[in-house]
Image (cartoon, helix red, strand yellow):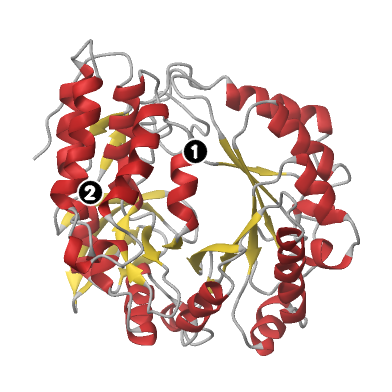
């Protein structure tokens, strides 16, 4: 269904070269020795599974997605980027042993995580970064981090525009407000911090400092609405800390001050908090004046974990979709799409504006997402209910290829807006979301390619993702 274009210039997306279908062969890592070993992806008991054998450590059989059909749907929406014009490593031969953005990469950096420190003010039993376990302090200097900024902004054909400070706990970096300010001065449009929220909640004036410096998003660790979640996962009570972060941002909002928005980030573990994703999403919606998204993170099980524990704790993206469907009643498994699903939008906006835009071409199994439209006094409505999103993306992709060949783009802009009318389901749309409003938002996005249109769109919606 896709038309491949090889023309130069503003092209940011390519048809995927990903091997598709099941079963199929791939490569994986032995969890014991980390050697690359052959593996097979196959369907077993309705799930996507991976079977792999290490000559030294034996056979491993793991569930990747609990619903293989959901995986196959995601796989259909794979896209590749166009790679890098100036990779850090120009002659890489084998992945993943030659680390860095190299000539083998199809994608550019969409969001860069920068670890400011490996120090942390918590000792979480569940820690993705394994903070505090290194036995030494890793903390780049201010100058080293600014150099990293320069490298990211020099990336071509698309300079990096989004970064997320991580760690450890990035807010305890000695010059955190200053490094946020420096990042904005160097042109990053979206600056996030992945944080437990302790410093924001407890230190007077800290939120105001980072807001003034230009922080856009607080990516807030949020494991549920029961205190026992935090005691088990984080080693101490923290629920009140989370509430204080939300209230502090709300106070700034009510005072008319510029402030970051909040994205809640629950680590999801089977048999631990798998009964709570619906409550977390409902809580986010109740606080939608300052909370603009929820990004669930299924637990990452790595290294030497006994098979029995892996099977007990494993929580996949399709588990998340099923649980949210059961627990909310308004978001179904069919409302989810993989991250690269929206790549045709970037491709079309790039062609219309004559300037390459950031495009999300990560692996389709990397994450799923949906958008909810929020209307007071009514159940949230997934955007998939009133827009034929698949038809819209297919048509946008085709139009992008046609537009790139044209010298005069005006007719393509008109056609782009007409596509929305074609795929807009008026009778199923919420009362506050008429076609004229949606056309106005997209017109700004297609004409200027700036974030104002996207911001106006997200103002009435709640992002829901799993990564």
Give the x, y percent position of residue 242: 71, 73
Tell me the CA gap for discs 2 and 1: 24 Å
- Residue at 29%, 49% (x, y): give it: 436
For mark 1, does the 10 Å Cα neighbourhood hold few (<14), some (14 to 19), or many (20 or more) residues?
few
Camera-side residue: 116 or 27?
116
- Residue at 59%, 24% (x, y): give it: 153
Give the x, y percent position of residue 282: 49, 79
Occupied quadrant, residue 360? top left
Q: In this view, does 341 lie above or below 401?
A: below
- Residue at 24%, 21% (x, y): give it: 410
- Residue at 77%, 29% (x, y): give it: 144
Q: In terms of sequence position, does the residue under pointer 2 or pointer 1 come before the other? A: 2
Left or right of residue 122, residue 72 in this image: left
The residue furthest left is: 1
Mark 2 or 1, closer to the camera: 1
Occupied quadrant, residue 442? top left
Q: In which quarter of the image is the N terminus?
A: top left
Left or right of residue 17, residue 201 in this image: right
Camera-side residue: 423 or 70?
423
Left or right of residue 441, residue 256 in this image: right
Q: Residue 418 carries which label?
A: none
Q: Is residue 263 above or below residue 457?
A: below
The residue furthest right is: 204
Please name the residue that numbered disc 2 is placed on.
Answer: 77
SS at badge 1: helix
Give the x, y percent position of residue 270: 46, 82
Please name the residue that numbered disc 1 is placed on.
Answer: 451
Camera-side residue: 135 or 277?
277
Number of disc labels: 2
The residue furthest top is: 407
């Amino acid at each position: 269904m896709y038309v491949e274009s090889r023309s130069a210039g503003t092209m940011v997306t390519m048809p995927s070269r990903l091997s598709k279908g099941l079963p199929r062969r791939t490569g994986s890592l032995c969890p014991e020795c980390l050697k690359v070993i052959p593996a097979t992806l196959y369907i077993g008991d309705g799930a996507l599974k991976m079977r792999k054998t290490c000559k030294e450590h034996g056979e491993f059989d793991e569930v990747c997605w609990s619903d293989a059909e959901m995986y196959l749907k995601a796989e259909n929406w794979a896209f590749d980027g166009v790679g890098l014009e100036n990779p850090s490593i120009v002659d890489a031969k084998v992945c993943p042993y030659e680390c860095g953005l190299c000539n083998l990469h199809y994608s550019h950096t969409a969001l860069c995580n920068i670890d400011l420190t490996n120090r942390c003010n918590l000792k979480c039993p569940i820690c993705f970064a394994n903070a505090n376990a290194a036995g030494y302090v890793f903390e780049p200097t201010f100058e080293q981090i600014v150099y990293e900024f320069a490298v990211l902004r020099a990336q071509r054909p698309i300079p990096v525009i989004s970064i997320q400070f991580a760690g450890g706990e990035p807010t305890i970096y000695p010059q955190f407000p200053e490094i946020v300010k420096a990042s904005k001065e160097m042109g990053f449009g979206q600056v996030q911090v992945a944080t437990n929220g302790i410093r924001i909640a407890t230190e007077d004036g800290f939120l105001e400092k980072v807001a003034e410096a230009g922080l856009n998003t607080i990516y807030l660790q949020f494991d549920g609405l029961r205190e026992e979640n935090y005691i088990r996962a984080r080693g101490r009570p923290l629920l009140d800390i989370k509430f204080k972060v939300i209230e502090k941002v709300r106070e700034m909002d009510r005072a008319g001050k510029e402030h970051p928005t909040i994205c809640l980030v629950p680590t999801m573990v089977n048999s631990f908090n798998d009964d709570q994703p619906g409550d977390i999403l409902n809580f986010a919606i109740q606080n939608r004046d300052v909370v603009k998204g929820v990004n669930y993170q299924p637990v990452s099980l790595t290294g030497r974990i006994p098979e029995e524990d892996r099977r007990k704790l494993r929580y996949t993206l399709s588990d998340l979709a099923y649980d949210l469907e059961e627990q909310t009643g308004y978001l179904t498994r069919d409302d989810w799409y993989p991250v690269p699903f929206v790549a045709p939008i970037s491709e079309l906006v790039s062609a219309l504006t004559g300037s390459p835009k950031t495009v999300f071409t990560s692996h389709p199994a990397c994450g799923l997402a949906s958008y909810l439209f929020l209307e007071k006094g009514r159940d949230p409505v997934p955007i998939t209910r009133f827009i034929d999103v698949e038809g819209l993306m297919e048509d946008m992709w085709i139009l992008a290829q046609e537009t790139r060949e044209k010298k005069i783009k005006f007719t393509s802009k008109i056609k782009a807006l007409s596509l929305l009318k074609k795929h807009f389901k008026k009778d199923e749309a919420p009362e506050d979301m008429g076609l004229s409003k949606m056309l106005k938002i997209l017109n700004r996005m297609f004409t200027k390619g700036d974030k104002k249109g996207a911001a106006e769109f997200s103002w009435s919606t709640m992002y829901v993702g799993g990564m």
